[in-house]
Image: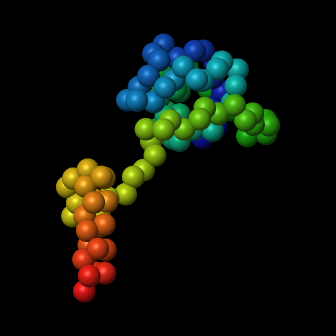
Amino acid sequence: MRIRIVQKPAVACIDGVRLDQFRPGHVYHLGSLMAGVFLAEGWAEPADDQEPRRQDSPSIPRNLTREFFPPYYDGSSSALAAEQASRRRARRRK
């Protein structure tokens, strides 16, 4: 959903998402949940689809990157690497 920020958000962060990066007057393309928060709080208004979009969208925080671990795994990533290395060594010995 495209929204135009009309005033700076009153809080700096909601559930780990930084809101201080959004600037009044700029148009952003947000997901429906985040856009709903901005609209409900009165921080933004729906943007017209005919207007050109600025490329001022905030960067994705590093803590939102996805890591993959097998569903059967219950340890740290270094323990997983050590386990895989020992399996490789055992296969070479056979």
Residue 69 drawn at (x, y percent): 32, 58
Which is nearer the eye, 13 or 84? 84
Pick the front one: 18 or 69: 69
Kindly indicate the quadrant of the structure image that contains residue 82.
bottom left
User: Which residue is at 45% across, 30% downward?
Assistant: 17
Rendered image coloring scheme: rainbow
User: Between residues 36 and 83, which one lies in front from this camera angle?
Assistant: 83
**Measured from the top left, where is residue 68 in percent x and y?**
37, 57
Query: Going by the image, does 13 lie left or right of 82?
Result: right
Compared across the picture, whether 1 is left or right of 64 comes to: right
**Direction bottom: furthest residue:** 94
Residue at the image position 45 percent from the left and 16 percent from the top: 11
- Residue 24 position (above or below residue 58): above
Within the image, what quadrant is residue 44 found in? Answer: top right
Above or below for 49 versus 42 = below
Q: Is residue 31 above or below residue 4?
A: below
Residue 54 screen position, x and y as percent: 75, 33
Q: Is residue 71 visible?
A: no
Please give the count of numbered marks on the rendered protein.
0
Q: In the figure, is residue 83 to the left or right of 60?
A: left
Residue found 64% across the figure and 20% down from its top: 23
